[in-house]
Amino acid sequence: MAVDFKDYYATLGIARDASADQIKAAFRKLARQYHPDVAKDKKNAEAKFKEINEANEVLSDPVKRKKYDELGANWEQGVPSQPPPNGQRAGGQRGPSGAERGQEFHFGGTGFSDFFEQFFSGGSRYGVPGTEYDAGERPGSGAPRARRGSDIEGDILVTLEEAMHGTVRPISLQIAHPATGEAETHSFKVRIPPGATDGRRIRVPAQGEPGRAGAPAGDLYLRVRHAAHPDFSAREADIYHELEVAPWEAVLGAELVVRTLDGSLKLRLPAGTQNGQQLRVRSRGLPKGKSGERGDFHVIVMVRLPTELSPQEKTEWEKLRETSRFNPRAAHNP
């Protein structure tokens, strides 16, 4: 089954030679516009938000972007999409033993397209090879040897809001058998627990490759991939937020209201706060298991300087320059 090519540059509305900063800015602008929490049309916004995240996932990574650009050149010339080399299929690869499985499978509900699964999803799609065992057949009888189905791995896109509160996600897995042309679709629900960190593997029993000759099916392992957020990022259970402040707030100090993933909090900005300085609020990050403990919320202060000044504002800044005792170069030029 061929997959549709995804034009990630068009998704973000940027040129193919866009810089890393331009990619970041385009993603943040669109992510704020289509974030499901703020959009009026939540269903369409959710689908668009996933597309934006997928594009950002590839284009913000130099290695993935290079690979994507190399693939893109073929599609621009009208070459149809092709499966990966060595007989691998969209969403599926050879097992660790090297034996060709001869099957392809496609996920639904994970938040990633088949195009991304085929070319940019990390890790082996088949995790553990099937296990053969004696089912009572005699040598030469022609009876098939029972074999447990292989485990399958996939990626699942999880928003930070879902990681904070937990959710239940409907998933479908279609396994196609090229030899017969038949396809089996399994639909089930997967529970994303509160505190699901990036890279965590969620086991779904008996939803992997079907077994042979009555043997049990393998398991499905879904690897959590945090969706990029326009305002927050996560490292394990800690949440990080870049907070823009005015120069006078950093110099004089201020009482600010800061939005978090689960409400707002009041933050005291100490006088003399430096650009890039981090302030930590304990226990406002992601949950840590069932203990009730949580990670921390880190505020990274970004002092925002004016880029345009009115004549009056320029006069005030000049007065400050003349009257201020602060001279950062004095220590280096005694």
Image (cartoon, rainbow, N blue to C red):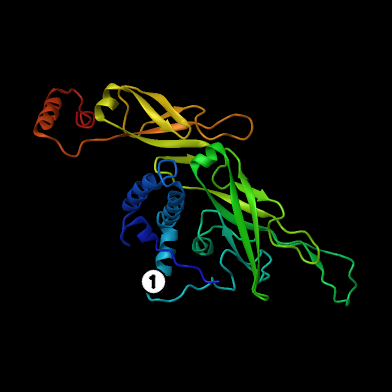
Q: SS at mark 1?
A: helix
Residue at figure coordinates x 62%, y 63% from the top left: 174
Q: How many marks?
A: 1
- State which quarter of the image contains the N terminus: bottom right
Q: Which of 276 and 50 is in front in this view?
A: 50
Q: Name the quadrant of the C terminus.
A: top left
- The residue labelled by disc 1 is 73
- Quarter of the image for residue 277 reads top left
Asked if 46 appears above or below 6 in the picture, the reply is above
Would you call the spot at circle 1 few (<14 residues within 10 Å), some (14-19), or many (20 or more)? few
* Residue 244 percent coordinates (x, y): 32, 34
Residue at 52% across / 71% down in the picture?
Answer: 2
Q: Nearer the viewer, residue 334 or 186?
A: 186
Q: Which of 144 and 188 is in front in this view?
A: 188
Residue 11 relative to residue 179: left or right: left
Q: Where 286 sits versus 23, above or below?
A: above
Outermost residue on the front side: it is 41
Q: In this view, does 288 lie to the left or right of 328?
A: right
Residue 105 lies in quadrant = bottom right
Where residue 268 sits: x, y (%)?
37, 22
- Residue 241 visible to an observer of this rendering: yes
**Where in the figure is residue 204, as x and y percent of width and height?**
67, 51
- Going by the numbered disc 1, the residue's amino acid type is Ala
Residue 175 position by quadrant: bottom right
